[in-house]
Amino acid sequence: MKLTPEELAHFETEGWLFLPERFDREEIGLLRREADAVYAQERQEVWREKSGVARTAFAAHTFNEAYRRLGRHPRLVEPVQQLLDGPVYMHQFKINAKAAFDGEVWQWHQDYGTWKRDDDMPEPRAMNIALFLDEVTAVNGPLFIVPKSHKAGTLEAGHDLETTSYPLWTLDRATVKRLADAGGIVAPQGPAGSVLMFHSNIVHASPPNISPWPRTIVYLSLCHVDNHIRQFKRADWIAHRDFTPIEPLSDDSLRELARESVATQAAE
Amino acid sequence: MKLTPEELAHFETEGWLFLPERFDREEIGLLRREADAVYAQERQEVWREKSGVARTAFAAHTFNEAYRRLGRHPRLVEPVQQLLDGPVYMHQFKINAKAAFDGEVWQWHQDYGTWKRDDDMPEPRAMNIALFLDEVTAVNGPLFIVPKSHKAGTLEAGHDLETTSYPLWTLDRATVKRLADAGGIVAPQGPAGSVLMFHSNIVHASPPNISPWPRTIVYLSLCHVDNHIRQFKRADWIAHRDFTPIEPLSDDSLRELARESVATQAAE
């Protein structure tokens, strides 16, 4: 899966790129079931909302076979290698739940702001590629992205320890308004299996999910290996310290596991 | 402005109807300015979010000339007279702010649930017609509507006195999920000046507005005069006690005021 020149140009100008339906029903079915299994575990990698439902699960690629394969999937890793122009390692891996009714806000922020301040990542040569495990619509807490904001550099931010269970370096309102008045705000929507890429300096947020349906998205935060973090303040399952270049698996690695899993269930 | 047979059929089946761009730029400009003037007043009709910004202003048609004219505007009153099949009076009038960054949730509810329980309105022969004063998009807290839920009758509800500053009879999660799984959820979006009608038993909600832009909507809750409320527990500026049939003004009544207002400003 190589990005086209048009897609590369869109990313360069706008700072984000939406690729609808890149994973099929079998693959998503497997990941959806495994996400529920991950959330059901009581372990330090699984963070919960104030209500107790899962908010996010870190590092599932280190303890779950389906997510191990997803973390090395060529449809996710190769476009990022292409954009970052070289080998990448996994800086962070999370499955964000945004649970039905209870999923809370992610305030306006830039990811690189956190990676710089908390992890001393030298440059914004890192980015997110996200996979929708549920259909994302206007009603279940879609991601809000401020196009072109990746050109604004790394902005001043305050450390929000109060709004939700997860600490985040968040932007002030005047900055968000200025950038949104200039670039607008998009809310990419599409079926499960769609992929969303965005620059590590893009300004983004997501509202609470008040709908009766979940909105699960997996985020791979991939970093050029030369640009690895220098500071190890956060747990190694939040900000990884294994800078080995990812070797992508074959394109059908996840589909094969899905078929084995279905065959096993049928045999039981 | 008469509804077409197709529009009437859509309302009957779905319980809601969206009419894009029924009011023009001059009219909306006037109402937008006057809304800010209303919110700036310290009076009992203006309710505030926990942050202090305005959440809603009641009964502005009783103390503001632009809203007096809007409350008798034929483009809003006549379609409701048509659907309710007879003369109507103003049961409630509010300008909901859903302020930039601070606008809070309205939980899942039916309006008639409140009108029945609090005001003893005999039947759901009443409905809302809403006018967008700002463009409504996926990002600034659009209204979420469960199509066909108006056929479910008046559902069990609990009195929510805690989530926001405004007490509301809200539905339980299992009920919302059951109806949304059957009918889906729509989030009508469109430019300022658009009109949204919905049945008094339709299940609806709206999420917080985390965007840097306001989302102001005026709601006229009109009731058939024969169906007036029987119980006067709530303040008369929340649930009105004047059951006189509304006589619509001329179609250009609001536009005339907008022009006078602009001429006055230019002369100053």
Image: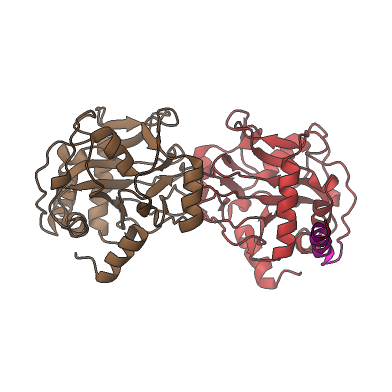
Chain colours: A brown, B red
- With B163 as the anchor, is A195 left or right in this view? left
- With A213 as the anchor, is A199 left or right in this view? left
Total labels drawn:
0
Residue A225 image position (x, y, % from top left): 13, 46
Tell me which residue sits at (48%, 53%) in the image. Answer: A180
Q: Quadrant of the C terminus of chain B?
A: bottom right
- Please tell me whether residue A2 is drawn above or below residue A26 in the rendered image: below
Q: Is residue A32 visible?
A: yes
Residue B115 image position (x, y, % from top left): 73, 41
Residue A218 image position (x, y, % from top left): 28, 46
Q: Quadrant of residue B163?
A: top right
Q: Quadrant of the N terminus of chain B?
A: bottom right
Tell me the magenta residue range. B249-266
Q: Is residue A184 visible?
A: no
> Can residue B245 be found in the magenta stretch?
no
Q: Residue furthest front?
A: B268
- Please tell me whether residue B3 is drawn above or below residue A162 in the rendered image: below
Q: Quadrant of residue A119?
A: top left
Residue A79 image position (x, y, % from top left): 21, 59
- With B219 as the anchor, is A199 left or right in this view? left
What secondary structure is the stretch in magenta mostly built from? helix
Q: Nearer the viewer, residue B226 or A10?
A: A10
Q: Nearer the viewer, residue B213 or A260?
A: B213
> Can residue B261 be found in the magenta stretch?
yes
Q: Nearer the viewer, residue B20 or B156?
A: B20
Tell me which residue sits at (34%, 57%) in the image. Answer: A15
